[in-house]
Amino acid sequence: MDCLVESELVQKESETVLGPEKFVWRDVQRSSTQGETIIAGLRDTTDQSYEWFCEHFMECVIPTAEWKLFARRKRLSEYVTPTLEAFALLIYRNAYEKWNEEFTVNEQNSMENEENSNVGGDGMSSLTSSKSVHGFLYTGESKGSRKYEGWNPAGMRFYNDVLGLIVEQRGRTGCPFERNLLNRLATKPKGGRGSDDGRRAPRASNHVEQLMQIVGV
């Protein structure tokens, strides 16, 4: 998945990878009419953590050509729909712990293999047989879901709650988030990932609203 590739690239660039709890969380001081805590964060964060997420991961849910065309020219809400923005957050929260674990094990394997090679070892790492501790939060064999059968109820609730928050925040006037994000992207040095189209496989267009209907969200 492209988000996994992006996560590994951010790690290798020695940039701190933020956990989803940095920019989206449940506000224990507030609750809905059903008694559930309300999702908070995103554009209300004050530490630019959600700008960081959008900079590095929002490209994963739209065609790369659109990201290159619009990211430096338009505000996020002009080319990323609320459903796609919520879907990006759902994917990241679902897979964050597993991706972090896989990246750490792969890095340790690589370092150990290099050390073995330098000392004349067999080049095989003992970590290659390590079992995963973390799984996907809302899919796979997580609680309430079965492998290849979509999101569990907790994942669907998270998506719906995040989507509601995004729609509410986008409707506010005077919020500086999108202006700040546009300035961040417009002044970002060009190059790095995505600078060479020849090195990237083509990506299919998506219809996320239909996907959500299929998985029952």
Image: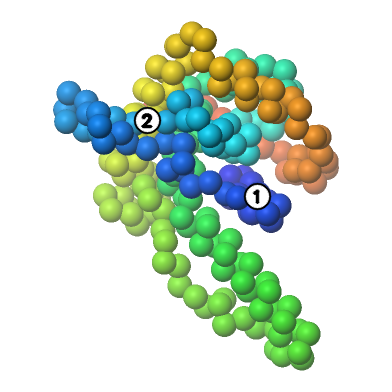
- Relative placement, left or right, of 107 versus 155 is right
Q: CA distance from mark 2 to mark 1?
A: 25 Å
- Relative placement, left or right, of 198 versus 95 is right
Q: Is residue 89 visible?
A: yes
User: Which image quadrant for residue 111?
Assistant: bottom right
Out of 83 and 22, give the one closest to the viewer. Answer: 22
Residue 173 drawn above or below residue 28 = above
Percent x, y of residue 146: 32, 53
**Mark 1 closeness class: few <14, some 14–19, many ≥20 residues within 10 Å:** few
Q: Earlier in the sequence, mark 2 or mark 1?
A: 1
Residue 165 drawn above or below residue 175 = below
Out of 78 and 216, give the one closest to the viewer. Answer: 78
- Relative placement, left or right, of 95 versus 184 is left
Q: Amino acid at mark 2?
A: Ala
Q: Residue at x 65, y 31 (%)?
A: 63
Percent x, y of residue 13: 71, 52
Percent x, y of residue 159: 38, 33
Placement of the C terminus among the 4 image quadrants:
top left
Residue that numbered label 2 is attached to: 40
Residue that numbered label 1 is attached to: 15
In the structure shown, which secondary structural element does the residue marked by tag 2 occupy?
strand
- Relative placement, left or right, of 128 versus 39 is right
Out of 64 and 105, give the one closest to the viewer. Answer: 105
Kindly check if marks 2 and 1 are in contact, taking CB atoms under 8 A apart as contact: no
User: Which image quadrant for residue 198?
Assistant: top right
Percent x, y of residue 170: 47, 16
Out of 146 and 116, give the one closest to the viewer. Answer: 116
Q: Amino acid at mark 1?
A: Glu
